Image (cartoon, grey):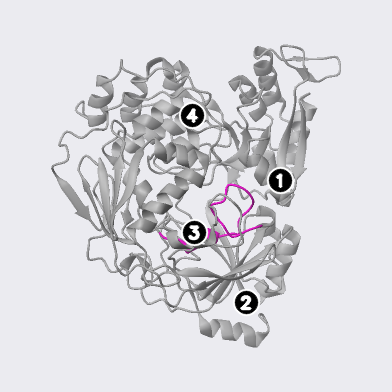
Amino acid sequence: MSSKSPIRELVLKRRDVMLGMAASGAGAAMGFQPGFARASDGTSELVKSHGYSFFGDLKYPPDFTHFDYVNPDAPKGGEISMSARGTFDGMNRWASKGRPGLYSGLVAEAMLARAPFDEAVPADSITDSYCHLAKSVEYPKSKEWCVFHIRPEARFSDGTQLTAHDAAFTHSLFLEQGIRSFARSVKQRISSVEAIDDLTLRATFVDGISRRSLISQVGSTPVFSKAWYEKTGERLDEPSLLTPLGSGPYVVDDFDINRYIIYKRNPDYWGWHLPVNVGRHNFDRVRVEYFLDETAEFEAFKAGEYTFRQEGSTKRWATGYDFPGVQSGSIKREELPDGLPPSPVGFVFNMQRAPFTDIRVREALSLAFNFEWVSASLQYGLTTQRHSFVQNTPLEAKGPPSGLEKVLLETLGDLVPAEMMRDDAVRAHTSNPDTVSDRRNQRKALKLLQDAGWSVGSDGKFRDADGTLVEFDIMLSSSTSDTAEAIITTYVQTLNKWGITAGMDKVDSAQYQGRFLDKDFDMMYTRNHAFMSAGTGLNQLYGSETAIVSSYNPQSLQSPLVDAIIEGSLQTSSREEEEAALMALDRALRYLRIQIPSGYVAENWVASYDMYEHPENLPPLALGALDFWWFNQDKYEALKASGALR
């Protein structure tokens, strides 16, 4: 590795100027000295582009006609319907309370293209974003500010013009009424967003910080109608049956609380001509059917009440699809490639609460989870053990640190534990698949708990160093799948067998959501977020800055080591350096044992009535069923004629 690497030169200069611990209730934040990100060329050289990539290497040229992975001739029409489990109480996706309807955020668009159904756009590049509401973005090389030039033809779904004043209003709305962790993060990095005129939006960024993701952050903020908010008196942070007025290709057509939602493709949508939309948004209607439990949900699919299903149950995939619709070929099953890292699902500790503040306790409790037995006995051997937060990607830490990753970690000095520098990256433990409770792992756990001051009383139960009985619950929702509940039940039984007093706290879905947001739980079976690029959003996922209030950081993780690595990732100037920094982040998260990882399935399991089609070569970053698949009218008519569909 060249000794002239930019990351080496920059971080070595600042080996002795690390920030101290911040005396705040949220915990300490450790990072590189401010000023690290300032470009040497000032603001003299301007970039004006049809898209944005921090590294300046957009895949698609200014005159591109469509994304490579779409079918530009895909027919428009038909309906795709899927299911949701649980309840919803409103249609405001951005409310900080309540449970919004699935996909209710699809009505809004942003300066840069975003997926209405929460998938990557484009789906074949991690680092690229392309203009949408804006026709171009302009910024200096130093990225001290940016200007979006808005398309004059952009319209809200009611036909009124979308302007820079709406975008500036929406920015302020998110700061005043948005999710607290997001608002706090934005205020600390973006000094102003203002309308220069009707079609010019300017954002100015705070000096002395990394600006690598700030243009993307402003560019991905949804834009709502200022006039609509003024007329209705609605609030962004409160549940509502009204959906904020946006400019997207779909609008809400109809809904019945806790029963269904129907979105319809807007025939008067302003943006059909844009290259980013060609071959996309092909269904006339997208319908979501709600069910209280998974049994009713699956039976409804068999009966044709909804027609597309992405299967998440290993048991059902292995045993549940032997019914007439599949046997006749009316329903097809596909195992489609998934190029994204598997979702980091597992048992999450609330690290605000004892005893989970002790890494030895977290490791000991991890040893009680027997993945091998769970996979073989509850998941039909269809899952693979996950070790990494970015499993099966170039970012996955393996072996001891080397190359640029080692360079970055070395600059952090005593923040990095010696064993983390010396040893292989932490991997999930192995267990005996023939028994739920592995005695070898039990002995290891006992030693760790003794080191943490725990002891076993005369009743056979563990107590902490103060002699207090250690008790905690694992919270789960009433809509949790049978398989997930069986996994939780099995884990709790093992903990109890080992003398650890644990239980299950099953609550309804609305209470579950509220307690999750308030961090009112001991443990839960949920997911963290994987990461494929560096950005200030990493602070919301894993940083101390907003740990207590961030719903994206369920552990409330507050680690000076993680904070410093995130800051280092924001200072990288090439994809190679960025990958090295993210590899260090993966290594640190695994070392800290913030989650007990469960298994994953490497493919997308899809069952659908045979009337949907998709490109032969799917992109790596999205399945895209609601984005760029399409409807075959002839196949639909054949299914109706056969009686497979009503």
- Label 1 belongs to which residue? 511
Labels 1 and 2 touching (C-beta < 8 A):
no
- Element assignment for label 1: helix
Q: CA distance from mark 3 to mark 4?
A: 34 Å
Tell me the magenta residue range: 89-109
Choose top left, top right, bottom left or bottom right for residue 470. Answer: top right
From the viewer's perspective, is 226 left or right of 577? right
Look at label 4 and name its amino acid. Answer: Ser
> Looking at the image, can residue 309 be seen?
yes
Closer to the chain start, of discs 3 and 4, is 3
In the rendering, at what x and y percent does residue 637 appear?
58, 86
Look at label 1 and name its amino acid. Answer: Gln
Q: Residues within 10 Å of mark 1 (few under 14, many from 20)?
A: some
Q: CA distance from mark 2 to mark 3?
A: 46 Å
Q: CA distance from mark 1 to mark 2?
A: 39 Å
- Label 4 belongs to which residue? 544
In the rendering, at what x and y percent does residue 125 appear?
35, 53
Look at label 2 and name its amino acid. Answer: Ser
User: Residue 199 or 290: which is nearer the viewer?
Assistant: 199
Residue farthest to the left, as pictured: 44
- Element assignment for label 2: loop
Look at label 3 and name its amino acid. Answer: Tyr
- Label 3 belongs to which residue? 229
User: What residue lies at 69% left-to-right and 62% top-to-bottom?
Assistant: 258
